[in-house]
């Protein structure tokens, strides 16, 4: 009888009288772009913290670009990384008739309801910017492993990201803004949301990076504060930044772990209000819209980012599953597909200008390249994702 979703079973059973309608559907197949295995147009939902902040907008835009090229319908729900809203967004997208969903959840615990909802509705599901931790969330990991609809996850090496940012923060840099060329030693940590899986991994990296610095430089140690959480608003980011400085005005660096969204905007703005721009090194992840100007004026010292194509690959995995591509179809007992996506690191205007030329002024993938990505099996798609860099784009678009 072939693969048939519960949604299409009900639709055809209601329209044509049960088994007779089911038999007629079994002979259908989708051959055109944007058509699923059952011949219907593919509809994919996007559950994201925000589609309007710097990274969120880039993430949704790159998915929409691919969807337009492939003839896929897109529905987006902003959930603010509030647990109840994350789980509700999956229910909303399933009810909207999505064949697949890509989600950026805030905590592993939310994936229990997300996976169960997708299992019940026979909707394919993949994560972007996130990965369920087998170590910290074994029950959730097992649920994903035994799901026939959990496709997999695209995420970054967050421990390595944290270590690299500490390496940049502690090193002298003659190309930086004049007031922040000397390496930092008193680093404050502004966290994202309590329990956020990505923050936990970055935090491991920050601590590991400080340990590595101190082991190599015992007479010139660096310190890292415990995190104070700013959640998802600019006002909280501003409040946490002011709290850090009021408590310890010898701080010379601030890590805003939550990225280039509202908390970072609030923190950078508060430092400016306190006349501390260009006096305290600020590091973060997820490039700000005005990062070049912030690097030039000392508002930012370094940032990791350029990974906004991560959700593109999550989307392509779900698209392939909806199309019935064998190497992407979930198998009970296997966790699913995993892609580790690379970051770009910048700590000077010159480094950002290279990124701007190849990732901002022009998309890192042409329309034809996106069409080609959508035809690849998993191994080839994974290789393409892990190869993405400024040098990779230079070579392809020479």
Image (cartoon, helix red, strand yellow):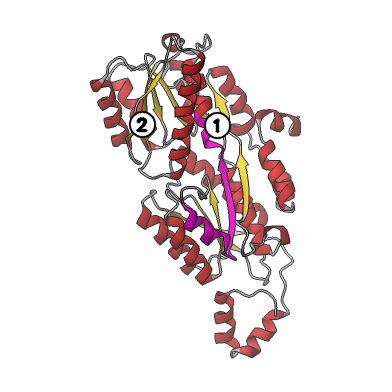
Q: Which mark is residue 241?
A: none
Whether label 1 touches label 2, CB < 8 Å: no
Disc 1 versus disc 2: nearer the observer? 1
Q: In this rendering, does residue 388 appear at all? A: yes
Q: Which mark is residue 190?
A: 2
**Residue 1 appears at what percent x and percent y?**
70, 80
Q: Is residue 220 above or below residue 84?
A: above
Crowd rating for badge 2 (residues with CA inside 10 Å; few <14, some 14–19, many 20+): many
Name the secondary structure under disc 2.
strand
Magenta region includes residue 140? yes
Left or right, residue 391 beside residue 215: right
**Residue 7 appears at what percent x and percent y?**
55, 75
Name the secondary structure under disc 1.
helix
Q: Give the Cα separation between the discs numbered 1 and 2.
A: 18 Å
* Residue at 42% over, 56% down: 110
First to last magenta residue range:
137-162
Looking at the image, the residue that sits furthest to the left is 246
* Residue at 64% over, 70% down: 40
Q: Earlier in the sequence, mark 1 or mark 2?
A: 1
Q: In this rendering, does residue 367 appear at all? A: no
Left or right, residue 114 beside residue 124: left
* Residue at 37% over, 13% down: 279
Q: Is residue 27 above or below residue 136?
A: below
Q: Quadrant of the C terminus?
A: top right
Q: Which residue is mark 1?
A: 160
Left or right, residue 103 beside residue 358: left
Crowd rating for badge 1 (residues with CA inside 10 Å; few <14, some 14–19, many 20+): some
Magenta region includes residue 205? no
**Residue 288 appears at what percent x and percent y?**
46, 31
């Amino acid at each position: 009888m072939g693969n048939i979703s519960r949604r299409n079973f009900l639709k055809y059973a209601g329209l044509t009288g049960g088994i007779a309608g089911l038999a007629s559907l079994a002979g259908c197949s989708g051959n055109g772009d944007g058509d699923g295995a059952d011949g219907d147009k593919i509809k994919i939902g996007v559950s994201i913290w925000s589609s309007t902040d710097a990274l969120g907008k880039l993430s949704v835009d790159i998915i929409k670009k691919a969807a337009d090229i492939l003839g896929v319908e897109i529905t987006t729900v902003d959930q603010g990384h509030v647990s109840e809203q994350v789980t509700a967004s999956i229910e909303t997208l399933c009810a909207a008739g999505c064949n697949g969903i890509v989600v950026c959840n805030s905590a592993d615990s939310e994936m229990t309801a997300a996976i169960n909802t997708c299992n019940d509705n026979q909707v394919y599901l993949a994560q972007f910017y996130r990965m369920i931790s087998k170590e910290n969330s074994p029950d959730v990991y097992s649920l994903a492993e035994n799901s026939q609809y959990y496709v997999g996850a695209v995420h970054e090496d967050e421990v390595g990201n944290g270590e690299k940012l500490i390496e940049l923060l502690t090193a002298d840099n003659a190309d930086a803004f004049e007031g922040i060329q000397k390496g930092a030693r008193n680093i404050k940590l502004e966290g994202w949301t309590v329990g956020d899986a990505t923050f936990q991994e970055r935090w491991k990296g920050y601590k590991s990076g400080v340990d590595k610095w101190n082991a190599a430089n015992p007479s010139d140690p660096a310190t890292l504060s415990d995190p104070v959480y700013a959640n998802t608003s600019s006002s909280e980011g501003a409040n946490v930044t002011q709290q850090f400085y009021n408590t310890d005005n010898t701080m010379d660096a601030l890590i805003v772990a939550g990225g280039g969204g509202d908390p970072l905007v609030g923190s950078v703005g508060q430092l400016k209000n306190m006349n501390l721009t260009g006096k305290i090194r600020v590091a973060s992840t997820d490039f700000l819209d005005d990062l070049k100007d912030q690097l030039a004026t000392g508002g930012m010292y370094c940032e990791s980012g350029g990974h906004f194509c991560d959700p593109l690959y999550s989307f392509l995995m779900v698209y392939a599953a909806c199309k019935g591509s064998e190497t992407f179809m979930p198998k009970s007992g296997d966790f699913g597909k995993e892609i580790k996506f690379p970051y770009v690191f910048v700590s000077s205007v010159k480094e950002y200008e290279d990124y701007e030329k190849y990732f901002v002024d022009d998309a890192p993938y042409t329309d034809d390249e996106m069409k080609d990505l959508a035809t690849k099996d998993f191994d080839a798609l994974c290789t393409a994702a892990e190869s993405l860099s400024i040098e990779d784009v230079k070579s392809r678009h020479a």
